[in-house]
Amino acid sequence: MHNTTELQAALHTISLYSPDPLAMARFYSAAYGMSLEAVEGGYVCRGPGRQVQITTGPANQLGYAQFALHTPAAWQHLRQRVQALDAQAVPAHYPAGAVAVCDPDGNRIVFTAPEDSSLAGSHAELPAATLQHFALRTQQLPQMLAFYTDQLGFVLSDAVRDAEGQLRACFLRSDHLHHALALFLAPVSCFDHQSFEAPDWASMKAWGDHMASLREPIVWGIGRHGPGNDVFFMVRDPDGNLAEISAEIEHCEPGRPAGEWAHEERTLNLWGKAILRS
Ligand SMILES: [Fe+2]
């Protein structure tokens, strides 16, 4: 029986490794309308509601994902929950008290206290888009699912199984939004994508036109995911990671039963072709 109470946290920052951090930072800064600043070991890109950091390292690997807790009570509960887990080194620039854990694949997840809209602000030329979810590929999906639900308190929103009943993908939420993390069974464990959630359908068009102005081709979509019901399109960053703009993600009621989907193209794109990770 999996946990059914969300931990009440939202994705705040994605940090990626890259052999060419400057090329990656320039891409995210331009494609997603963020400032670009050099920091120790790499670069940080900041925009309203979105923050991406790139540091030197192997391509297609997560440096860390940072979640900010919504309330002091949720922060207190999370800290008690992870006390039993092995503490991991927290990136140096985080405030005292941040906690970090490693999942079974070695991805580092950092949790921080509630904060007062440090990423607030607006971007004059572009519609809004808030860093909202990310996805990982893994060779050990059941172990990863168990870690995120049983140890960290993520809630399973939807599972994808093949005809033999094997779990192929799962979508996990950390608050009322359908998924903050997606896990895909794949031949290689690595980062898959991050998504920036736009406020409405009209914003998708504006973001599409923005990508066109940069000559960044859409590599998947525009379509609508089955699990989460989010409208989406994806581009590729210079390292080959997918990067998404989405809208209309499902808002889940507490206690919503986990859904089951067939492992087929239609599940990952109700409107057509899919990228199947295995
Ligand atoms: Fe996504």
Image: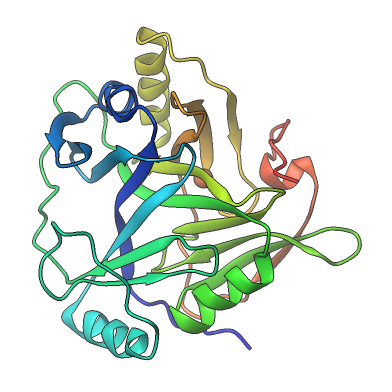
Task: Name the quadrant of the N terminus.
Answer: bottom right
User: On the image, which quarter does residue 29 sit in?
Assistant: top left
In the displayed structure image, the side of residue 61 where residue 198 appears, left or right:
left
Q: Position of residue 249 (x, y in %)?
A: 47, 50
Against 255, residue 216 (above or below) is above
Taking the view exactly as shown, the residue that stands out farthest to the right is 164
The reply to whether residue 4 is in sight is no
Q: How many marks?
A: 0
The reply to whether residue 122 is in sight is yes
Q: How is the image coloured?
A: rainbow
Against 47, residue 139 (above or below) is below
Q: Position of residue 235 (x, y in %)?
A: 49, 26
In the displayed structure image, the side of residue 231 where residue 80 appears, left or right:
left
Q: Residue at x 49, y 26 (%)?
A: 236
In the displayed structure image, the side of residue 32 where residue 5 appears, left or right:
right
In the displayed structure image, the side of residue 122 where residue 5 appears, left or right:
right
Q: Residue at x 68, y 71 (%)?
A: 142
User: On the image, which quarter does residue 197 sit in?
Assistant: top left
Against 2, residue 98 (above or below) is above
Q: Residue at x 35, y 56 (%)?
A: 65
Of the pair 110 and 210, the residue shown nearer to us:
110
Q: Position of residue 271 (x, y in %)?
A: 69, 33
Of the pair 196 and 240, the residue shown nearer to us:
240
Q: Position of residue 212 (x, y in %)?
A: 41, 11
Of the pair 81 and 133, the residue shown nearer to us:
81
Against 4, residue 238 (above or below) is above
